[in-house]
Amino acid sequence: MEDQLPTDPLGAARENKGSRQGRSLRPSISELVTMQWQTERQDLDLQNFLLAIYFMRLGTLVDRAYDRHCQKEYGINGGDMRLMLALRRSGPPYVKRPTDLFRALLVTSGAITKKVDRLVEAGYVERLQDPSHSGGFLVHLTKKGLQIVELAVEHLANHSALAPAMSQLSPEDRERGTQFALRVLSTLESSEMGLEDEIDPPAARVHNGRKR
């Protein structure tokens, strides 16, 4: 696996279909999507278009599975758990500003406020006064929240929705796939940050009604 899609995604889909042993020969939905688009628009190079579809479908499937787990085990949705994961990976004392959270999670400030409200009600996070901004607040992971997020990390590591697919790949393929995804995401995130700075220069950003 190179750091790019095969030049012929249709051929790759057919090869994958033919290599499946002990499984139905019916193509997966994503393989069918690939074949249909390659048939309908043979005049275009669909590599980037198809890769975007793969990423979106993969994210949806993983997110859906983890959301079910979080709802069942912790009484919150997967999106709320991602906020807790963002706090946990920051290290002690597990505190972040709302601005840091909505940038890290690629959601709006309003969405962060709703997530924090739900997590405060569940006792998983708390709001602390921000000493650097009058009227501002920080989001802090509580002891209860830390216990829950540790369980969540262990579940993600040991029972990921990706496990069935990853088990069919060699360690080398898994590593190359991971590095490929990281490189694509890093490039897109850098571009996104550049656009945000053009629209909202750092010197003009406002935090709770105050420039920061």
Image (cartoon, grey):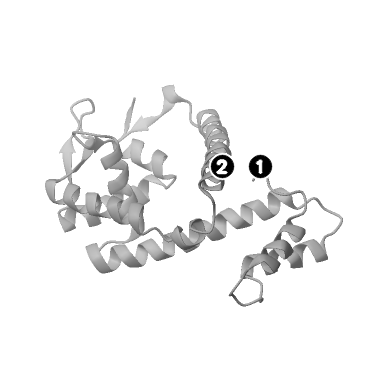
User: Is 64 situated left or right of 212 in this image?
Assistant: right
User: Is 147 situated left or right of 1 in this image?
Assistant: left
Residue tagged 2: 176
User: Is 144 situated left or right of 76 in this image?
Assistant: left
In depth, the one of 11 and 94 nearer the eye is 11
Residue at point 23%, 62% (across, down): 74
> What is the x, y in percent for residue 61?
48, 63
Number of residues whose C-alpha sits closer than 10 Å to that of mark 2, classed few (under 14), some (14–19) or many (20 or more): some
Looking at marks 1 and 2 on the same chain, the residue that comes earlier in the sequence is marked by 1
Q: Secondary structure at mark 1?
A: loop
Quarter location, residue 11: bottom right
Q: Which mark is residue 2?
A: 1
Are the residues flagged by discs 1 and 2 in contact, CB closer than 8 Å?
A: yes
Query: Which kind of residue does numbered mark 1 sit on?
Result: Glu
Q: Secondary structure at mark 2?
A: helix
In depth, the one of 78 and 106 nearer the eye is 78
For the question of whether residue 126 can be seen, the reply is yes
Q: Residue furthest left?
A: 143
Picture mark count:
2
In depth, the one of 24 and 64 nearer the eye is 24
Q: Is residue 22 above or below residue 50?
A: below
In depth, the one of 166 and 162 nearer the eye is 166
Quadrant housing the C terminus? top left
